[in-house]
Amino acid sequence: MLKLTHMKKDNHNQLWALRHSAEHVLMEAMLRLYGDKIIMAMGPATDDGFYFDFDVKGDFKISLENFAEIEAEMKKIIKEDLPITKEELSVKDAKKLFKDNPYKIEWLEEIEKRGDKPTVFWTGKEFVDLCAGPHAKSTGAIKAFKLLKLAGAYWHGDEKNKMLTRIYGTAFESQKELDDYLKMMAEAEKRDHRKLGKDLDLFVFADIIGKGLPMLTPRGTVIRKELEKFVLEEETRRGYQHVVTPHLAKVDLYKKSGHYPYYKDTMYPVMKVDEEELILRPMTCPHHFMLYKSRPHSYRELPVRIAEIASQFRYEKSGELSGLSRVRLFCLADAHIICAKDQAKQEIKNVLDLIDYMNKILGLKKGQDYCYRLSLGDRSDDNKKYYKDDEAWEKAETILREVLKEAKAPFFEAPGEAAFYGPKIDIQVKKVNGQEETAFTVQYDFVMPQRFDLAYINKEGKEEQPIVIHRSSIGCFERTMAFLIEHYAGAFPLWFSPVQIAVLSVAEKHAKHCEKLAQEFKDAGLRAEVWDENETVGNKIRKAVAQKIPYLIVIGDKELASEKLAVRLRGEKDTTEFEKDKFIAHAKKLVEERSGEL
Amino acid sequence: MLKLTHMKKDNHNQLWALRHSAEHVLMEAMLRLYGDKIIMAMGPATDDGFYFDFDVKGDFKISLENFAEIEAEMKKIIKEDLPITKEELSVKDAKKLFKDNPYKIEWLEEIEKRGDKPTVFWTGKEFVDLCAGPHAKSTGAIKAFKLLKLAGAYWHGDEKNKMLTRIYGTAFESQKELDDYLKMMAEAEKRDHRKLGKDLDLFVFADIIGKGLPMLTPRGTVIRKELEKFVLEEETRRGYQHVVTPHLAKVDLYKKSGHYPYYKDTMYPVMKVDEEELILRPMTCPHHFMLYKSRPHSYRELPVRIAEIASQFRYEKSGELSGLSRVRLFCLADAHIICAKDQAKQEIKNVLDLIDYMNKILGLKKGQDYCYRLSLGDRSDDNKKYYKDDEAWEKAETILREVLKEAKAPFFEAPGEAAFYGPKIDIQVKKVNGQEETAFTVQYDFVMPQRFDLAYINKEGKEEQPIVIHRSSIGCFERTMAFLIEHYAGAFPLWFSPVQIAVLSVAEKHAKHCEKLAQEFKDAGLRAEVWDENETVGNKIRKAVAQKIPYLIVIGDKELASEKLAVRLRGEKDTTEFEKDKFIAHAKKLVEERSGEL
């Protein structure tokens, strides 16, 4: 489906430069067209394209209807193939150049304060903008572009400032890539989990409950519980021991772990209860460590793999909340592996194997739908962000790199993205809109065992300090559900389809037989629903198809008379005939195998 | 095992009177023995017996060693069969009678303030106490008694007051009943879930996490997850739809529901997040109502049975916290049935049937281990506690009473124990210490549908208001676990035994075969553990027996050579021979059936 081509966050790459140039072309085109009515403010390239913010004079307004003439003017500029050239100049000269533009003057004052030297980029000899670059060599390099949407945006993103107008666009190195992108975006819009969540009745929000706090409906809960069951079964099979620990703890616990200073701003406020200061937990590691410490451990028990389907609470800014993918209370398939140092490498390999297995069952292809990112600590940092122990970092990073190489896993390295207590492997997924996102991580931790004084008795009867591996297997259920809804566009594999079989009656007299049949399916452990509403069967079929139900069975006079079942498989136009028992056995087998087939 | 004889909270019953008289006999005996060294304070009868608080003069001290002589003196008084007689008198006369006792004078001043008339009870002509009674006719009625323990207790329970000495005792109408009680208490002590929780490694606490916040170990979690699975399966089979809703909400939600003023003191403090005031939820009903309201409903859909395995947070006083049975964060097998008024009775019947079924599978006998209590609203109340709607209360109470009668359920009525929004049926369980406790409830609610404006479209196409039934099926998992640990003394039914099979090696050379065998059990979905520590097999067997593991299989030379398995069933001294496949099939069948057999 989608090919995962990891996009570097590096803004010096070619596409980034091209998009920045396209933004300059947009500005120039607009100045040519409406030069006396607008003041340009700023505009960068982004992961998806570019945008341009500008101010308007008087009651002049730009609408979507202007896009055609703007794009036409941009095409002219591209055709002119104007060279884009950089010039360094003094703040004084730059101020002269932009004397009529208060936004540029403000930028220049910032640059002056920092003691930096401004650079400008010329497009031909007509247009110039204050800009750090880089850019394409000439406007002709922009082979394909499109303006996408119009929005309001506050200057510096601050609502105390003036509201400017923003135009979004994108640009590519070829028309084919642009077409593919536009197709992808149209598909992504259809697949948006917030839209499908409503259409398929999977989750809802309520103002009176609060922001970022979704409620899963019965249908959404089926998906959630099936995923939980999958996690519990597979982790148990692989030697994990599940626990249940409380959703909150004394603040002291997070002071002891050292999380508090790093996570304070994303934690909920403290609750004073009697003499205790309690706080909702943003992670489970300290709980699991206290559980481990509740009794002594021998080397014979290691690795101890403590797992939990764990609710966790983090404050996300309200502007960043989004459906199920960004919430304020999430549930993670979490675990902490406590092992001897010489077991760590094998354990991390086992974790990657588990993740690969679970992703495969979920229908995700390695290297296409997901890949790995090795997040390293930037040890040139001032040591505030990273725990100071160069040797331990070196060793840990080497182990993770070796594991990834030995597992022949598709991965790339990202310096400065580690946790404060050690390097990590991030599981990067590609969303339907082409964006890459960190789904969850596997972390190597040599700091917490010290802070919590974790120990085991080694072969020689002496206390030794273990290593901790923090990991998830499937990530947080909310975000994974959001991803799967979009990945499958709601047409879920049979095993986690909220309704597996819809039995549709043609007329009222068939309703009873529908009920009987549905009950047989239910007794066999399948999720069946009877649709016996008083409307045409055509209508019911259309609705059931829109609901993406895997199997539809229509019951009319003909079907009442038949010994066999006529089953319409999702995606098929014709029905397939089954002996009833064989159909039930077939469906049960697919569910048990968590198959992607129908 | 234990017979459930509901003990009325009514202090006028015969046993209560007898115990109160035993307490007077205790006081009299102590005055005879140590009259110049103690000042009597007060002492009531209780559900379990009685206690007596007294003050000591100088450095006089009563210890357990005094119990023999006190009991001997009490026996004398009982043998004397002194009549116990009531006298009403003026406060003035009473003050004269108790002029040397500051505690009695304080009581009398309270009585005077209230404008009441004091009563005293005479035992023969020698001993008198200020007391409201009732009492037995004479001391000879006390056929059996025992002093149990000694403790410190503050006057009026207030730690600002003086610490008094308290003697606990109990009394019965026959020696047989007393013996049974003492046997039960000794057994209860052995079964105390806090002790077994430690011995069997089921749950732990940590100071740094907080009070009333237990952590379930891997073994405890097995029990929890098996119970959860049972609830999910059985409720799904009976037409419940499970949902997942957030553990917190805006305070507004509980103001709207009307819970806030009633529950404020047992709720956690408010957390301010952006502009929202969030609070941890003490119940799920408002969440479920908001979910119901997220789309319109037709009469055809009713009853809608919304269920959730739901975390809930209530502040309990630290002195009341106890193991798993009284915690500050619990998880309830919760549900709200939204139905038409004429469906309510049948739905409540179905709920009782579900509860009876689940209790049966858990091994609890109706009328012996649990019974029902019909909690009614005291409508003579000032209407602050109960929602005002006499007709609705009348109707609701009649329905609940009819259901209990038609279901031939063992029940009794308790006025003034209802929820503020309607009457309820409480599921009363008998603990191993003989105490009765409300496990959970089934509530009939005609108030919330109004507050939340819940509606459905009836056959005529018009909006109608439904009824809500609040219920649990198994109660809160923490308390149910505490109860089951004590009920089974840790010898759990196979299906929720944390470890089902222990495979014990005789010597090191047998360890490999043990592993192989255990893996076969695990592959069959059974929970098996290998015990191959370097210690004698006798020792291992003793430990495994103490852990109450259902099946023990010892592997030595003889067993290596045999085709068959020699399985030691819990509670048996000899082993039983099984073909391996037959044993696995046997165990799997028992687990699937959630059988109580081995």
Image (cartoon, coloured by chain):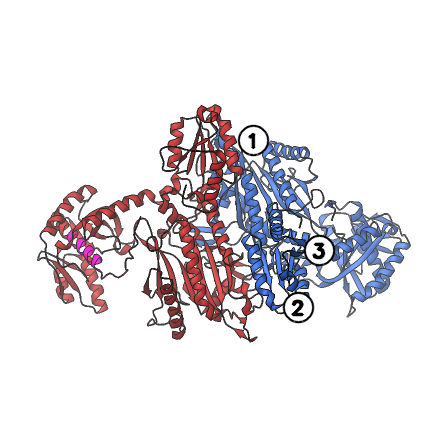
Chain colours: A red, B blue
Q: Which residue is mark 2?
A: B536
**What SS does tag 3 mark?**
loop
State the residue in front, B77 or B518: B518
Residue B298 in the image: state x and y as whole percent: 47, 31
Tell me the subunit letter for badge 3.
B
Tell me the subunit letter for badge 2.
B
| Vertical relation: A95 (above or below) A73 | below
| Left or right: residue B256 compared with residue B436 | left
Residue A24 falls within the magenta-colored stretch? yes
**What SS does tag 2 mark?**
loop
Inspect this view and state whether residue B130 appears.
no
Q: Earlier in the sequence, mark 3 or mark 2?
A: 2
Category of crowding for the residue at label 3, using alpha-carbon neighbours closer than 10 angstroms: few (below 14), some (14–19), many (at least 20): few
Which amino acid type corresponds to the residue marked 1 in the rendered image?
Lys
Which amino acid type corresponds to the residue marked 3 in the rendered image?
Gly
Are discs 1 and 2 less than 8 Å apart at CB? Answer: no
Q: CA distance from mark 1 to mark 2?
A: 67 Å
State the residue in front, A450 or B32: A450
Residue B486 in the image: state x and y as whole percent: 67, 54
Inspect this view and state whether residue B379 appears.
yes
Q: Which residue is mark 1?
A: B341
Task: Write the start and end of the magenta stretch as one range.
Answer: A1-25
| Vertical relation: B398 (above or below) B438 | above
Q: Earlier in the sequence, mark 3 or mark 1?
A: 1
Which amino acid type corresponds to the residue marked 2 in the rendered image?
Thr
Category of crowding for the residue at label 2, using alpha-carbon neighbours closer than 10 angstroms: few (below 14), some (14–19), many (at least 20): few
State the residue in front, A246 or B211: A246
Residue at the image point whose x is 32% and y is 64% from the top: A413
Residue B446 in the image: state x and y as whole percent: 56, 35
Residue at the image point whose x is 89% and y is 58% from the top: B76
